[in-house]
Image: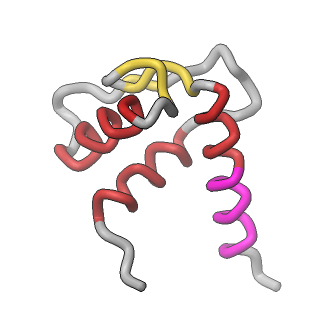
Amino acid sequence: MPIQQALIDEIELLLRYNLDSSQEGIKVHHTAREGLISATKRLHEKGLVSREDGGYLTDLGIETAGHTQAALRILTSKN
């Protein structure tokens, strides 16, 4: 099952969040790659981030980012 670039962009954004601090958000500037700008808007529409340009993770976003980051750690481990 191929993964479309739009989903890869959403995953990339979720991986950028620091889950060690709920007070640390991100801002996707208008000069960012168009795919990331669109991904941020979609994550906002899905209720995962607080603003169309990033902001903070919502409760659902924290859970989703946690699973995404855990999956990446598992997939990139040497074992």
Residue in the image at 57% along x and 36% along y: 17
Residue in the image at 45% along x and 44% along y: 13
Residue 59 percent location from the top left of the image? 66, 27
Would residue 69 be counted in the magenta stretch?
yes
Q: Residue furthest right?
A: 79
Residue 22 percent location from the top left of the image? 69, 20
Residue 53 percent location from the top left of the image? 32, 24
Residue in the image at 39% along x and 29% along y: 44
Q: Residue furthest front?
A: 46
59 or 16: nearer the viewer:
59
Q: Report the predominant secondary structure element of the magenta stretch.
A: helix
* Image quadrant in which you'd find residue 60: top right
Residue 39 percent location from the top left of the image? 32, 44
24 or 71: nearer the viewer:
71
Examine the rendered structure and indicate whether residue 6 appears above or below residue 43.
below
Quarter placement of the C terminus: bottom right
Would residue 42 be counted in the magenta stretch?
no
Numbered label tally:
0
Examine the rendered structure and indicate whether residue 9 appears above or below residue 75.
above
Report the span colored magenta: 67-76
Examine the rendered structure and indicate whether residue 43 appears above or below residue 67.
above
Residue in the image at 65% along x and 14% along y: 23
57 or 20: nearer the viewer:
57
Is residue 54 toward the left or the right of residue 19 in the image?
A: left
Is residue 64 toward the left or the right of residue 29 in the image?
A: right
Quarter placement of the N terminus: bottom left
